[in-house]
Amino acid sequence: MDLPIVDLLDDEIAVGWLTKHLHPNGLQCPRCGRGVQHAREFRHTKRSKVTVYRCQRCQQVYSLYSGTVFEKRWLRPAKVVLLLRGISKGETTASLARELKLSYPTVLNLRHALQSNTQQAQPRTRLNDEQTETDEMFQNAGEKRNQTRRP
């Protein structure tokens, strides 16, 4: 069952959460690096409901999604939060696309971009332990339930 949870999430709360996690040093101009306090609100996008800023120093236009995989996508902040939540929980691309009312290729491309960024951010150093334990998880991928009986 797919729930329309995106209608229940507040965009203002999502903007605060995304700013904290996408821009840990604060939202800054991508050209000169000045903070959002040195910019003016330029406009609000209609589809994504995101504030676009213009830097007062270099006149660069930027938003919450600038410099991220969500740049040039018109997704509401609530949808982005739910998409990140769904991907981190391991939900399927098809169910996320249906629940968030996005196209399958859009969700798939964002998933691949996020996974690629995550893989690049992994440390390259070896673990200090001589032995490392892992949990095993078995999935029946492509296996048949019962063998067919031969006459």
Image (cartoon, rainbow, N blue to C red):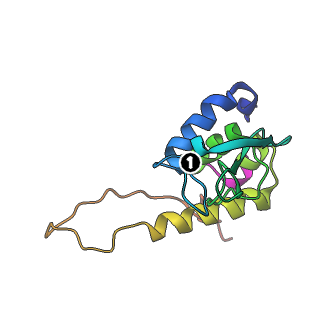
Measured as percent of width and height from the top left, residue 83 is found at 65, 46
Q: Amino acid at mark 1?
A: Leu
Q: Is residue 33 left or right of residue 80?
A: left
Residue situated in front as seen by the camera: 121 or 37? 37
Is 93 colored magenta in this rendering? yes
Q: Is residue 3 left or right of residue 123?
A: right
Q: Please, is residue 101 above or below residue 144 in the view?
A: above
Measured as percent of width and height from the top left, residue 146 is found at 60, 59
Residue at the spot 41% in from the left edge and 56% down from the top edge: 137
Which span of residues is magenta-colored?
91-95
Q: Please, is residue 45 above or below residue 34 in the view?
A: above
Callout 1 environment at 10 Å: few (<14), some (14 to 19), or many (20+)? many
The main secondary structure of the magenta stretch is: helix
Measured as percent of width and height from the top left, residue 74 is found at 79, 50
Instruction: Please state, as top left, top right, bottom left or bottom right, where the C terminus lies in the image.
Output: bottom right
Tell me where residue 15 sits by quadrant.
top right
Q: Please, is residue 99 above or below residue 29 in the view?
A: above
Q: Is residue 13 visible?
A: yes
Residue at the spot 15% in from the left edge and 66% down from the top edge: 129
Residue at the spot 76% in from the left edge and 31% down from the top edge: 4
Q: Residue furthest front?
A: 57
Give the residue number, with chain letter if any, for mark 1: 27
